[in-house]
Image (cartoon, rainbow, N blue to C red):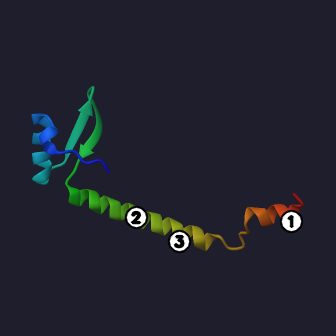
Amino acid sequence: MTRIQTTKLDPAMQEALRLVADGERVVLEWNGRAVAALVPLEDAEVAEAAEDAADLEAYRAAVAEQGNAIPLEQYLRRRGE
């Protein structure tokens, strides 16, 4: 993860970070289009935990679905390839 000292940011970005530090979410626009969001670190941590839980659930479903799955090499040997 990249870290930037806030003293190197322009005043508008410093103000945006102050808002985020106060718990607000800030959307950044580039050429009139929303391209990023600044969110409090706690929000990002909650989102990361939710993503990790979804990944774990998908992993468990894939493992349960394997059933009689065999490695590709074994399959190819059975076919004589």
| Residue 36 picture location, percent across and down | 28, 41
Which residue carries the number 3 mark?
A: 60
Query: Measured along the vertical axis of the image, is residue 35 above or below residue 20?
Result: above
| Residue 40 sits in quarter | bottom left
Please, what is the three-letter code of the amino acid marked with disc 3? Arg
Q: Give the residue furthest to the top.
A: 31
Q: Is residue 31 left or right of residue 20?
A: right
Q: How far apart are the alpha carbons under marks 1 and 3? A: 28 Å
Q: 10 Å neighbourhood of mark 2: few (<14), some, or many (≥20)?
A: few
Q: Earlier in the sequence, mark 1 or mark 2?
A: 2
CA gap between label 1 and label 2 equals 37 Å
Q: In the rendered structure, which amino acid carries the disc numbered 2?
A: Asp
Q: Which residue is mark 1?
A: 78
Name the residue beneath numbered marker 2.
52
Q: Quadrant of residue 81?
A: bottom right
- How many numbered marks have been drawn onto this rendered protein structure? 3
Secondary structure beneath label 3: helix
Label 2, secondary structure: give it. Answer: helix
- Marks 1, 3: nearer the viewer: 1
Identify which residue is drawn at 24% across, 58% down: 43
Q: Looking at the image, which residue sits at the far right? A: 80
Amino acid type, mark 1: Arg
Sequence-first tag of 1 and 3: 3
